[in-house]
Amino acid sequence: MNTLSRIGSALARLAVFSCALAFTACGGGGGGGNDPPAAGVQPASSCTADCGTVYIGLTDADGDFLSYTVDVVSLKLKRANGAMVETLPATTRVDFAQLVDLTEFFTAATVPNGAYVAATLRLDFTNAEISVEKGGAPVAANAVDAAGNALGVVDVNVTLDNRHHLVVSPGLASVFTLDFNLAATNSVDLATTPATVTVTPALVASLEHVDQKELRVRGPLVSVDTAAGTYVIDVRPCNMRDKRYGQLTVHTDADTTFEINGTNYTGSAGLDALSAAGAGTLTTAFGTLTKSTRQFDAQSVRAGTSVSGAGIDTVIGQVLGRSGDVLKVRGATVNRNRDGARFARGTVLVTIGPDTKVLKGGAEATPGDISVGQSIEAFGAATPVNSSAMSGDWTMDATAGRVRMHATPIYGFVKASSTGALTLQLDSIAGRRVSAFSFAGTGATAAQDADPANYEVTTGALDLSGLNIGEPTKLVGYPTPFGAAPPDFDARTLVDFPRLPAMLSMSWGLNGTKAPFTSQEPTGLVLDLANTSIGRLHFLSIGPKVLDLKVLPASPSIVPPSDGRTAYLVVMRGESRSFQDFGDFVAELGARLDGDTAMVGFTATGSYDGASNVVTARSIVVILK
């Protein structure tokens, strides 16, 4: 699991109403072509010269899912005149739970110029593969609707507010982000076997990227312009193996890092190596989008066999334990060169050796540097142990392959602090509960093995002045090389309590409430904590810290940020309405809560100031009945 927040795990522990929907990382396979467009639906490919380009990004908010893989059948944009335009050339299998801190460039669609007011995403849950964490282990989950019926094909509609339509014009690409919020629209019941996920699908649509997530674009190389420092790809998201989703120019500079077929380059040397690799070479670029020009600027590029599943099998996950040269990974994405990606709920044993090439943050490392808790991509030959590739076990031989070590996030509560060092009550590693890990062998002696109750972190020159004993913190870095602890972790980045992501969630049972607020103003909302209809969901999470809203001295004020991007969603039967302005969102709530409509769910994400008891919400999802 690559979830970078313990908000999702708080939801799992409380067996509550998970809330959040955003299109981010993608996994698995490649589908066949879509059915012909329905009557009145224009395919993007039929567009004539009177057209512009729309970059559509998919992202996912934090949730407690290890995998959430469904088929995306179609994505239609609705013009102001009612005409529909299809933007997808093929059914695409997407794992929304993977890499929730990332936004995937899904398509660069060429569509008719004009204003677009709505979008419809068609999802097919028939062959959905959903996994949640229970007791530290991945378990299967079935998706059902509110009546308990198995989900099949579902249309998810979202309408933009009147002041923020998607305007497409020639010469400048438009950006459209769809956020499929798993935490706000899925209720997880771990008591059943398999677990049950009750789904109320909804999309938050925005014309900018609300969360400051890294962007990823994938696809085969078309051409390289070394003089301009650019290259062009056919966009092909989500490990798709064929089809074209439009073209995109990727811009590089002297600081762009490249890894091509396992070899590292920087700047123009990397672009020369990419040119030498030739057209058709698979690429993945990570970077940012310049708002004014819609230019994609790559910070890092991978190509050839350095791309997951391209010419070599890949295992992506966290090292839960290590015995000698065998790394234990459970709940991993296995992406095989010959048949694509899947989530493996079983154990994947990765064997490394002295000839295994190891990269750590782009620099060369050794196999001994890989320890328990490390996030990895391992490249080698993957083989299923039994016929059930989804639920069974796997092995990987990486003795002649390589392992890429990724900076790994950890959450914990501060127990002690001194210059250059912290001791934590460790809560999670890369979104996985500590109970999933075995720390045997991590220490110089057995007595010095990492202890999650007293997890020792070296922090170097990081500023620890904002940390207080008992408060949660997030650190990003690398576990100490195997067999060399203490310390147990080398932190490169620190996020203290005031800057941790916060989520406020409340539910009101099946029938909801017609009066959820004590205050409902264009400048802020206050939930009524005395409402007798409040259901089992009533908490405020700040990183791994969970507060019961009903025992707080007062209900927090929920306000918009003073600046920056925002997205607010009102979900109703068969439709959702998305707003960028908080006042417009509150006005819509006022119109909908007319005495006949009830609110059943409310989720706000952003930051929390305990001193003022204020939640600053960049995103809100409200579910009405």
Image (tube, rainbow, N blue to C red):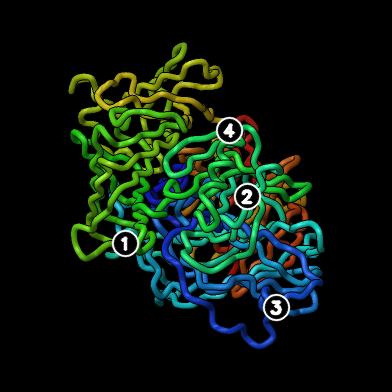
Q: Earlier in the sequence, mark 1 or mark 2?
A: 1
Q: In the rendered structure, are the residues bearing label 3 and label 4 in contact, judged by CB atoms less than 8 Å apart? A: no
Say which residue label 4 marks: 499
Where, quadrant-wise, is the C terminus in this rendering?
bottom right
Circle 2 — which element?
A: strand
Say which residue label 1 marks: 140
Q: Nearer the viewer, mark 1 or mark 2?
A: 2
Residue 406 at x, y percent in the picture: 43, 37
Q: Amino acid at mark 1?
A: Ala
Q: Residue furthest front?
A: 276
Residue 487 at x, y percent in the picture: 34, 19
Identify the residue at horizontal 64%, vertical 60% (top origin): 247
Question: How many residues crowd mark 4 within 10 Å: few (<14), some (14–19), many (20+)?
Answer: some
| Disc 3/disc 4 C-alpha distance (Å) | 47 Å
Q: Amino acid at mark 3?
A: Ser
Q: With respect to residue 323, does 115 lie above or below?
A: below
Q: With respect to residue 462, does 275 lie above or below?
A: below
Residue 343 at x, y percent in the picture: 35, 57
Q: Earlier in the sequence, mark 3 or mark 4?
A: 3
Question: How many residues crowd mark 1 within 10 Å: few (<14), some (14–19), many (20+)?
Answer: many
Q: Earlier in the sequence, mark 4 or mark 1?
A: 1
